[in-house]
């Protein structure tokens, strides 16, 4: 990677030294995760009644069977670490960094090939082909950065932690989480409804120029379509969409910001022309379309029932940030400064994205609340 210098001494599987700064960061994360869950909301507070508990008619048995097959491969000791109660606080301990504290579940690097294949089967049956390939590509790019830094033992395609929540074999609510550097996917099933947020996907570098996975690229379509939507706006529309000249220092609704407050800003998509709406629909589809067949269609219909705002910061010819925000969807995209490499300004070589379900349904929390009220009031 021309022009990128390694940052040294920052990334180990276990901290070499628990410095006061590191201890403070861990304490802050634990406190943030321990806050009663509310969900991302505007300054007006949580909007209720957005996520009705209902039957969709979709077949979720393939996902459930894949989870059962995986659990059947685990030893008693592995089950004690790799499956957790549905209401366990570790749902909210996901973090996109490469420091490996506060991880939970089973690390794929420690598992044999059969267990890894079983985890990938759960992902493949839960996600769309595009969503699955995107996750795998980013995992592969994690090895690429390990190769570039000479740290393949710390940065590789298997340094990800996988957890199953609930009891899929008993037919109740259940879910899974994949957690590690630049890949954090939370998936919850309540009946035949599925929630796939929070989902954080990123990459540094976004393209593998060499190494085992040379040619692999990630998040290029999200970058290109976001830029296309902004550049296809009229001058007046762009003025309304722009919320800042410079990029924010990181995503607003990233890790440990489950209760973040964020008001709508930018240009309502309802004011777009028909051609612009097609581009916006394609962009929304990239993020919503990470879910498996049927679930993505239902999710997109849910999103289209509400006004979505498009917000922008930065230069379409250089680095930029954009946001799609509605009562039922929050998407953020941003070019980032170097973390693994020593560039102190944002570049297109490093991208972060996050998708959330505002108003209390990240982790399927609102559906789970309704499920317990309906079936477990006693």
Image (cartoon, rainbow, N blue to C red):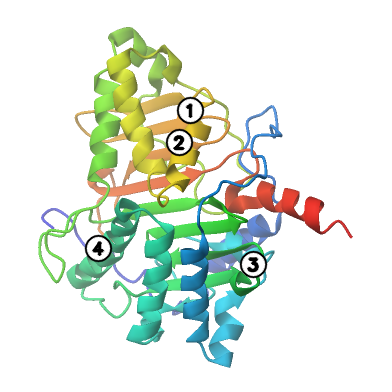
Judging by the rendered image, the residue that carries numbered circle 3 is 171
| Residue 6 sits in quarter | bottom left
Callout 2 secondary element: helix
Judging by the rendered image, the residue that carries numbered circle 2 is 300
The reply to whether dot 3 and dot 4 touch (C-beta < 8 Å) is: no
Label 3: how many Cα within 10 Å (few below 14, some 14–19, many 20+):
few
Q: Position of residue 276 (x, y in %)?
A: 30, 19
Alpha-carbon span between mark 1 and mark 4:
33 Å
- Nearest to viewer (mark 2 / mark 4): 2
Label 1: how many Cα within 10 Å (few below 14, some 14–19, many 20+):
some
Residue name at image x 20 percent, y 54 percent = 217
Label 2: how many Cα within 10 Å (few below 14, some 14–19, many 20+):
some
Residue name at image x 69 percent, y 27 percent = 44
Q: Position of residue 155 (x, y in %)?
A: 30, 72
Location of residue 360 with respect to 234 vertically, above or below = below
N-term mark: 3 or 4: 4
Judging by the rendered image, the residue that carries numbered circle 4 is 141
Q: Nearer the viewer, residue 37 or 54?
A: 54
Judging by the rendered image, the residue that carries numbered circle 1 is 304
Alpha-carbon span between mark 1 and mark 3:
31 Å
Q: Does residue 371 appear left or right of residue 130 in this picture?
A: right
Alpha-carbon span between mark 3 and mark 4:
36 Å
Alpha-carbon span between mark 2 and mark 4:
29 Å
Residue name at image x 57 percent, y 54 percent = 192
Callout 1 secondary element: helix
Location of residue 109 with respect to 229 vertically, above or below = below
**Residue 42, can we see it?**
yes
Alpha-carbon span between mark 3 and mark 2:
26 Å
Callout 3 secondary element: loop
- The quarter of the rendered structure image containing the N terminus is bottom left
N-term mark: 3 or 2: 3
- Nearest to viewer (mark 1 / mark 3): 3
């Amino acid at each position: 990677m021309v022009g990128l210098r390694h940052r040294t001494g920052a990334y180990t599987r276990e901290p070499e030294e628990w410095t006061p700064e590191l201890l403070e960061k861990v304490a802050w994360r634990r406190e943030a995760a321990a806050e009663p869950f509310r969900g991302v909301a505007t300054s007006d507070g949580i909007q209720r009644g957005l996520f009705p508990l209902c039957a969709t008619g979709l077949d979720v048995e393939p996902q459930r069977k894949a989870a059962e097959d995986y659990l059947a491969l685990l030893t008693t000791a592995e089950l004690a670490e790799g499956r957790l109660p549905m209401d366990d606080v570790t749902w909210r301990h996901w973090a996109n960094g490469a420091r490996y504290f506060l991880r939970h579940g089973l690390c794929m690097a420690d598992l044999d090939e059969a267990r890894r294949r079983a985890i990938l089967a759960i992902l493949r049956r839960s996600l769309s082909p595009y969503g699955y390939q995107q996750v795998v590509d980013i995992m592969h790019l994690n090895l690429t950065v390990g190769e570039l830094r000479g740290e393949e033992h710390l940065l590789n395609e298997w340094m990800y932690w996988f957890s199953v929540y609930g009891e899929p074999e008993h037919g109740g609510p259940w879910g899974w989480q994949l957690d590690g550097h630049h890949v954090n996917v939370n998936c919850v099933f309540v009946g035949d409804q599925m929630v796939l947020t929070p989902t954080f996907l990123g990459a540094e570098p976004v393209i593998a120029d060499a190494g085992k996975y040379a040619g692999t690229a990630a998040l290029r379509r999200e970058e290109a379509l976001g830029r296309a939507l902004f550049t296809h706006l009229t001058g007046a529309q762009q003025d309304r969409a722009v919320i800042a000249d410079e990029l924010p220092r990181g995503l607003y609704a990233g890790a440990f910001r489950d209760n973040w407050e964020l008001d709508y800003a930018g240009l309502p998509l309802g004011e777009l022309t028909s051609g612009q709406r097609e581009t916006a629909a394609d962009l929304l589809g990239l993020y919503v379309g990470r879910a498996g067949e049927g679930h993505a269609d239902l999710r997109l219909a849910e999103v289209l029932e509400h006004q979505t705002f498009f917000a922008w910061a930065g230069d379409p010819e250089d680095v930029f940030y954009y946001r799609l925000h509605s009562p039922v969807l929050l998407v953020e995209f941003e070019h980032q400064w170097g973390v693994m490499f020593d560039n102190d300004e944002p570049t297109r070589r490093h991208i972060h994205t996050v998708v959330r379900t505002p108003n209390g349904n990240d982790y399927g929390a609102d559906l789970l609340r309704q499920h317990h009220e309906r079936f477990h009031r006693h």
